Image (cartoon, helix red, strand yellow):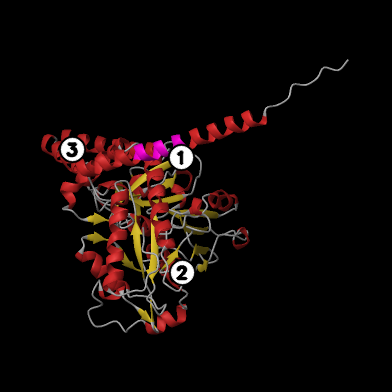
Amino acid sequence: MLQQRPMIDLTRVFLVVAVFISFCVFISFLNNTLYSSQVKIEKSDILMPLMNDEIYFDYAGAAPYTIEQIDQYSQFMKNNFLCNSHSPNVCGLRSSELVQNTRDTILKYFNAQDDYIIIFTSGCTHALRVVGESFPFEEGSQFIFTKSNHNSVLGIREFAKLKNASFLSVDEYSSSYLKTSIHPSLFAFPAEDNFNGVQYPLEWIEDINKHENWYSLIDAAAFVSHSLLDLSQVKPHFVTLSFYKIFGFPMGIGALLMRKDVVDKMSPIYFGGGTVYASLPNVDYHVFFGFSSKFEAGTLPISSIVGIKYGFEMIKKKGGIKSIQKHVKLLTQKLVTSLKQTKFENGNPVFEIYGNHFKNSSLQGGIITFNIHQNDNSLILTASINSFLREKKINIRTGCMCNPGSCLKSLGINEDEYMNDIPKQPKGGFDSNSCLDIMVGNKEAGAIRVSLGYASTEEEIERLIEVLNEYFKENQMKIKIPIK
């Protein structure tokens, strides 16, 4: 005789599932609330005295540094005498050890101890220049790069041209571009677009590296300010960055992380200073001390290198880069949601937002770039918004952010029209700020960028929203749903 199965109480099952889901939602809410509170406390205790009541939304330009970083740095410099690390004396050896310890700290942070060397530079731009100058371009070589690259990446093509290599800009990576080549060739893309915050798939690197004689370069400056780059998982041949983008201080120093297996293939044009082991004046002969010294001509900026350690310690105290990444993503979503909901009385959106916020938010960094429509649907000049925000002590960025490809594509501006409308360069050059407002026809080539980071807070987001509402009111804009 078959045994009768017990009846399942569906009501009880649904109740258990509902309780479990509610518990998960509550835990998620609690985690986010506690996390935000932690950042809030650190902001008021450390940054506010330094920033004089300013609100800072230009992390993609430079991260703010903390008072604690400066105090630790000052204390170290007061108690430790440093000198030229190339001098084999007591002080020189002490300085040399400090430099090596800092290299080790950087490699450990990016999980790159086994496969990479650190080359100190004045910043990401200098690091990119080192790659361009040293890369073994030759006739038949190719330099391919995505259009959404910083000017500093575009500049590498000048080195390619000098050696009769070809260059090509593309919208996205495709293996079809990487034809089998007997000539060393380079593909470059940003880990994160500094104009609109779009993050590009790091999986591209592995595919590029599979192609013989092809080398991969990523500009990681914007990405590493709030995201983890694990070089044990992805292995580009070259990574460039600036430390002030991560933790604000020291400025004027960056790094090129270069894979050890390509060092011997790179040939810098210039040599000089104490990085040279031996050289002769009458014979074309010189030998470098080691891997890094091949690319570091002259005495290193020891006093700047000292400060890097305290920046990484600050990131660790914030809970690490993964916590910062989570924090930035939450605040980015909060601001984007508020901007998206703002409508005119006729139902049209007020904000034109660029990037991956609505297409694929998993590939979007902490950058919110937008323009603002007027009642007649034309765009408000960014200088007007920037001027108003400056009066309210709110720091943002306007313009193309040194990324013409991404800027023009986002705004739908034709490159030929752009070139035709650029004014003729005056004698002595342009003023550094006069180029920020470039008009192409009746349209401005520029946008408003709000970029978030480790010390951004919900209160700051709310203050920005409040000030934008003030702007709308003062300019009699017919807003149906004010930003919340």
Give, as a three-letter code, the residue at label 2: Ser
Do the residues bearing badges 1 and 3 touch, measured as CB atoms within 8 Å? no
Total marks shown come to 3
Residue 27 magenta: yes
Q: Residue at x 42, y 72 (%)?
A: 345
Q: Residue 31: tell me if it is visible.
A: yes
Q: Quadrant of residue 436?
A: bottom left
Secondary structure at badge 1 equals: loop
The magenta stretch spans which residues? 26-35
Q: Position of residue 78 (x, y in %)?
A: 11, 38
Give, as a three-letter code, the residue at label 1: Asp
Against 260, is 338 above or below?
below
> What residue is disc 2 on?
410
Q: Residue at x 43, y 65 (%)?
A: 353
Secondary structure at badge 3 equals: helix
Q: Nearer the viewer, residue 312 or 163?
A: 312
In the picture provided, is 150 more to the left or to the right than 182?
A: left
Main secondary structure found in the magenta portion:
helix
Give, as a three-letter code, the residue at label 3: Gln
**Residue 72 disc label:** 3
Against 256, is 344 above or below?
below
